Amino acid sequence: MNKKQPIVTVMALIFSLIVSDILYLYISKKHTASQAVRVYNEFIEGRRCYGSESILSYVTPTREPEKRYTTDYFIADSTGDGIPELHLRTSREYIIFTYRDENMEWLHSFFSSPWEYHLLQNGVMVHQVDIGDTEIIGGIYYNFFTLNHTGACVPGMSFGWRDVNNNYSLDVDDEYYYDESDCTPDKWFEQTKEYIYINEEGHQCIRNEVDWIRYCEAK
């Protein structure tokens, strides 16, 4: 009998078990992700509540059906675990729900200036802040981040621009920052070109932002 045969058999068995475990985890996660999307859609369609709150609880400001906020939503994975979150953005707040233990759960909210928060196609979020100081010098800062499983923000890259000469244009007289360090305009544009661009009207725009789905218009 070949002495190597038992070793080969054992190795093959171990390999088979590893592959089976990986396949099981993959199928399980895909199933959970599918269930999460189903639950989110039921909430959006008004067939499910989060606790005692329905979708209309967030859309209508004073529980008056004839009044409502402009509301958008999108489903994307912002925690990086393969299970998507439901992002709900009204003109009053930005709420993020996650799926856990077969239920929809609150994960995080932004109540101040929800329109400053942007969602990218890869699930990363961007806080775009228009700044100004006592000298009325403006500029824009971009802070990229994700969320962990507890809902805490996990900081990523950041960069910004300060309009020193106050002419509302990015030029050599302004100040540029990348990850809290000063940099030259050329280096700044090179480092940020895959994240932002200047449109035909001269406005800075964020690349790869999701196409939010409009739930309703304000009235």
Image (spheres, rainbow, N blue to C red):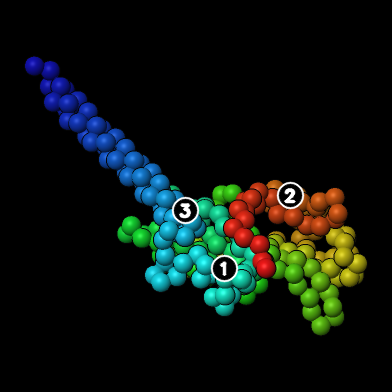
Between residues 104 and 4, which one lies in front from this camera angle?
A: 104
Q: Residues within 10 Å of mark 2 (few under 14, many from 20)?
A: few
Q: Quadrant of residue 94?
A: bottom right
In the rendering, at what x and y percent does residue 36 appear? 41, 53
Residue at 13 percent across and 26 percent down: it is 6
> Would residue 23 appear left or right of 164 to someone viewing this image?
left
Earlier residue among tags 3 and 2:
3
Image vertical order of residue 107 relative to residue 204, above or below = below
- Quadrant assignment for the C terminus: bottom right
User: What residue is disc 2 on?
Assistant: 193
Give coordinates of residue 57: x percent, y percent: 51, 71
**Residue at numbered disc 1:** 59
Disc marking residue 180: none
Q: Nearer the viewer, residue 171 or 72?
A: 72
Q: Quadrant of the N terminus?
A: top left
Amino acid on which the number 2 mark rests in the picture: Lys
State how far apart marks 3 and 2 are (Cα).
35 Å
Left or right relative to 50: residue 55: right
- Seen as rendered, the residue at the extreme bottom is 134
Q: Which residue position holds label 3?
A: 41
Q: Is residue 76 left or right of residue 159?
A: left
Mark 2: secondary structure = loop
